[in-house]
Amino acid sequence: MPTVFIDGEAGTTGLGIRERLTHLPVTARSIDPAHRKNAAARQALMAEVDVVILCLPDDAAREAVALADALNDKAPRILDASSAHRSSEGWAYGFAELTASQPQRIAAARRVSNPGCYATGAIALLRPLTEAGLLPADHPITINAVSGYSGGGRQMIEAHEATGGPAFELYAMGLDHKHIPEIALHGGLTRRPIFVPSAGHFAQGMLVSIPVHLDALPGRPSADDLRAALASHYAGSDIVRVIDNAPPRPEPDALNGTDILELFVYSSGTHPQAVLVARLDNLGKGASGAAVQNLRLMLGLPEAPAHA
């Protein structure tokens, strides 16, 4: 039975992965909590497992990779849930629906980077359109997103769980959010997008939206053309679903507890404008669910039902 070590399993993503591993034919190894920051102890455990899943801050993830690399022929495969390697050479990007061949790349890779939650929604909308030539790579793009506070780290979680926590907040207003490089690279963009993330006073769930002026695109495609390109790209996927009858008011938490990603295309029918929307659980397909999907590919395990 394959063995897996989650380095950083006490965090939100790590706990979610650990719970999901109980449904897989793997043996999960844990380090003594007293040694969780002991480099030698962690490296010794890395040498004994098949895959290490990193649920660490970026700098700590880079250090963990160095520990693994120093093991040479005993080095385990690595699945990194941090943002440290999402745009790095030699790493397979862990969005299995990115291209038809992406699952094979993930399955064969020694190093896999798990996508960011916001990036998952944005790339799912952008990549099929840039590949189809409907959206130029250098087109000016604005991405708006709202997430439950569970994905914002300890300080944000504590602020929202306190009495009278903020109802809504914009953040990363320096326009330099860490997900931007991976969105541009894997979304097929050559022009840096504007990304405006926000958090609402709810625990989990996410909406990512991208407004588009249809008459500013080559060939002036219709909203139906965009929807058709998305549907063609994700045809046959049980996880990424293009919804024809989009809800008039999409709720961010409707997919909580699932690993499903839903895509909508909204238009007025009167004006040459559209809004592309992705909905997902930021702790599901946006984090732990995607990690376990990638782990299944890496270990050659069958795909799970999308509701699991």
Image (spheres, rainbow, N blue to C red):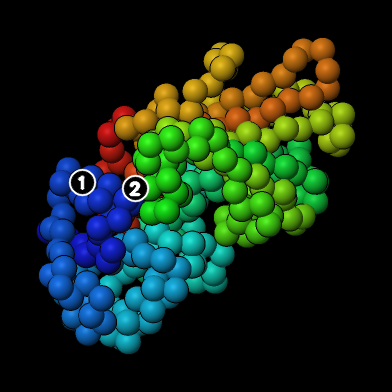
- Identify which amino acid the numbered label 1 is placed on: Glu
Locate residue 152, reporting x and y percent. 45, 49
Earlier-in-chain disc, 2 versus 1: 1
Residue 264 seen in render: yes
> Which of 275/292 is in front?
275
Secondary structure beneath dot 2 equals: helix
Q: Is residue 181 left or right of residue 189?
A: left
Q: Amino acid at mark 2?
A: Ser
Quarter of the C terminus within the rendering: top left
Mark 2 touches mark 1? (CB < 8 Å): yes
Label 1 Cα crowd, 10 Å radius (few <14 / some 14-19 / many 20+): few
- Tag of residue 19: 1
Residue visible at 67% across and 41% down?
143
Answer with the quarter of the image where residue 298 lies.
Answer: bottom left
- Alpha carbon separation for disc pair 2 and 1: 9 Å
Task: Tell me: residue 307, above or below residue 103.
Answer: above
Give how far across and how far down residue 72 sits, in percent: 31, 86
Q: Position of residue 157 (x, y in %)?
A: 39, 46
Picture quarter with the N terminus? bottom left
Identify the residue at image location x=61%, y=53%. 172
Does 190 sit left or right of 217 as displayed? Answer: left
Where is residue 87? Give x, y as percent.
56, 64
Q: Residue at x 57, y 59 (%)?
A: 178
- Residue tagged 2: 288
